[in-house]
Image: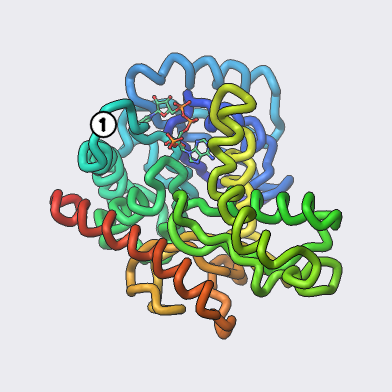
Amino acid sequence: SAQPVTIALSGAGGQIGYAALFRIAAGEICGPDTPVNLRLLEIPQGVGAAEGTALELADCAFPLLNSITIDTDPAVVFEGANLALLVGARPRTAGMERSDLLSANGGIFGPQGRALNDHAADDIRVVVVGNPANTNALIAQRNAPDIPTNRFTALTRLDHNRAVGLLAERSGASVSDISGVTVWGNHSLTQYPDLSHAIVNGVPALDAVDPAWARGEYIERVAKRGGEVIQVRGSSSAASAANAAIDHMHDWINGTGADWTSVSLPSDGSYGVPNGLISSFPVRSTGGSWTIVQGLTVDVFSRERIDASVTELLEEHDAVASLGLL
Ligand code: NDP
């Protein structure tokens, strides 16, 4: 079998961690030939839950699971890490100002960026799931000057998968007959799920469904899907978020094939998104790195939606910059 891969996950005692770890230990990121070393990061209050999960992981007797380490020190957890899924974050609580939220997360993602910089393997790849994910990823990236910037990403794959799932439901097509969906911008309510280049059963999506729906209700439904899940289920989405994080890492390593997906990554200026801002784009993965799909036409409606979400990202950037977190 291949060399083991060392996979670090923060927030390992939380809901998303619980939904992700068993699948990761089963080999769903790197495949059935690659043994996995799991490195679990938690804050002191989360260690017990992470330890309990580790007991259950042992009880699964996964053939690929080589080792499990649990620690509260990012320097220990990220030592030699090839992949990092940064799930643990400070949630917004009632009465919390946005600047408090950003600075609390700066206190998490700044030190984690520095620890990745000093301890991770040379091929480290990072996906941030914990919210505000794009800006948390930016903070980590800016605190890791020795790691190539394009190794830092934030998760918009859940938004992408929601966009595909809801289009399938509306059009009656199966998910495998849909391609060319893009989520642009921030992982937030301003995100723009864009069907202008999507194809359903060989037909442009905007001919297959009502374009007014696609540019109205649909966008809002995708963006607010997390709230819908909370309302119906009584707690926030966890398995679908874990699934998306696994899809993201799987495709980064193994490639996307013909269709593209959506990933938040540092902009190279494509589509007018300011350089360095971590924003969601249509991307393909080949040879282990993401490339932004070029040359898509952006009409007036799409331009406005992309710009609105990028403006929000710039505001978050300016807020964390003025807090000295970058
Ligand atoms: P979850 O595992 O449910 O969520 C973790 C993070 O993922 C939150 O920031 C959440 O954002 C975010 N998230 C992103 N997309 C989604 C989505 N679609 N649905 C739900 N969440 C999403 O949280 P828990 O509270 O169960 O667990 C968090 C764990 O992290 C705790 O065990 C805590 O101790 C730990 N933690 C670890 C840290 C570390 O390792 N240094 C630092 C801070 C916390 P949102 O809140 O906006 O839903």
Q: Position of residue 25 (x, y in %)?
A: 63, 35
Residue 266: in sight, yes or no? yes
Query: Which residue is rendered at x = 40% and y = 71% of the image?
Result: 267
- In the displayed structure, would residue 34 be above or below residue 211? above
- What sort of colour scheme is used for the picture? rainbow
Label 1 lies in ligand 1 vicinity (Cβ under 8 Å): no
Residue 66: in sight, yes or no? no
Q: Quadrant of ligand 1?
A: top left
Query: Which residue is rendered at x = 43% and y = 57% of the image?
Result: 186
Query: Which residue is rendered at x = 67% and y = 17% of the image?
Result: 59
- In the displayed structure, would residue 146 be above or below residue 102? below
Local secondary structure at mark 1? loop
- In the displayed structure, would residue 26 be above or below residue 147? above
Q: Viewer-proximal residue, 37 or 286?
A: 286
Q: Viewer-proximal residue, 244 or 200?
A: 200
Q: Position of residue 123 (x, y in %)?
A: 46, 59
**Quarter holding the C terminus?**
bottom left
Query: Which residue is rendered at x = 45% and y = 50% of the image?
Result: 188
Direction front: furthest residue: 212
Q: Viewer-proximal residue, 287 or 90?
A: 90
Q: Position of residue 324 (x, y in %)?
A: 14, 52
Q: Identify residue for label 1.
A: 96
Q: Is residue 177 left or right of residue 78?
A: right
Q: Position of residue 95 (x, y in %)?
A: 26, 28
- In the displayed structure, would residue 135 be above or below residue 257? above
Amino acid type of the residue tagged 1 in the rendering: Met
Q: How many marks?
A: 1
Q: Quadrant of residue 252?
A: bottom right
Task: Judge the density around disc 1: few (<14), some (14-19), many (≥20) Cα neighbours within 10 Å.
Answer: few
Q: Quadrant of residue 240?
A: top right
